[in-house]
Structures are given as structure tokens and as C-alpha cells.
Amino acid sequence: MIALRLREHLHLPAQATGALLGVDASTVSHATTLTAKLLASTGIPLPPAAPPPATLPRTPAELLDYAAAAGITLTIPGNGQTMPGHFRTRGQTRRHARS
């Protein structure tokens, strides 16, 4: 469900979503397809999402900042997955403290 919401709301590619969640991009793609079909078949509407940010988060730090601004505590655990180069902040190793 988290992968589906990340992909639909923030338009994150499967590779970036997979890196955030610690799974392969193909797993993200498969899981989000199945989840969307299951939700559609139940007829249960999802709560409306907040409008996407004017500038989409491109790094983990930007994603954490966006979530914090919306009052959401989000942590990105170290998961051994390689973050795609275009999703990393050059030279930045910023970590957010857990609440």
C-alpha cells in the first residue's frame, strides 16, 4: 500500500520506491499493480491525497522534509539497497532523527 501511494502521489519511479522500501523495482511494480486491482475491486475509496508538492522530492532528504511539513514522521531505514544516482543528493549524507 505504501509503495502504491508513493508511486501515485509523488510519481516516484519503481527503482526509487524499491530503494526506499528495500525491495527490487520489479517487486514494487508487481505489488503496486496487484494492490491497485484489489482496491478497485473492493469499491472502497481511498481518502483523498493532499495535492502533490510543486516540486517533487528528488532525494531522500527532500522526501523526509516534505513528509515533515505535512506532519508525517517518516524514516528511511538503511536497507542495503543502492539508491539510484539521480535520487541521491550530491555529497549530502543528511539523516533525520527518529521521533
Image (cartoon, helix red, strand yellow):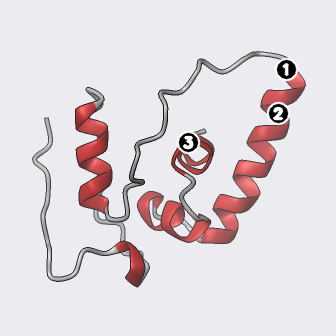
Q: CA distance from mark 2 to mark 3?
A: 18 Å
In this rendering, is residue 35 above or below 92? above
SS of the residue at dot 1? helix
Q: Which residue is mark 1?
A: 42
Q: Amino acid at mark 1?
A: Thr
Where's residue 59, x and y in %? 32, 65
Q: Residues within 10 Å of mark 3 (few under 14, many from 20)?
A: some
Contact between labelled residues 2 and 1, with CB atoms less than 8 Å apart: yes
- Going from the N terminus, do you reach mark 3 or mark 1 first? 3
Q: Residue at x 71, y 61 (%)?
A: 29
Quarter placement of the C terminus: top left
Q: Amino acid at mark 3?
A: His
Where's residue 11, x and y in %? 57, 54
- Going from the N terminus, do you reach mark 2 or mark 3 first? 3
Q: Residue at x 39, y 53 (%)?
A: 55
Figure disc tally: 3
Q: Nearer the viewer, mark 2 or mark 3?
A: 3
Say which quarter of the image contains residue 45: top right
Q: Nearer the viewer, mark 3 or mark 1?
A: 3
SS of the residue at dot 2? helix
Q: Amino acid at mark 2?
A: Leu
Q: Which residue is mark 2?
A: 38
Residue 22 falls left or right of residue 88: right
SS of the residue at dot 3? helix
Q: Taking the image as drawn, is residue 83 in sight? A: no
Nearest the eye: 65 or 33: 65
Q: CA distance from mark 1 to mark 2?
A: 6 Å
In this rendering, is residue 30 above or below 51? below
Residue 9, labelled with which disc? 3
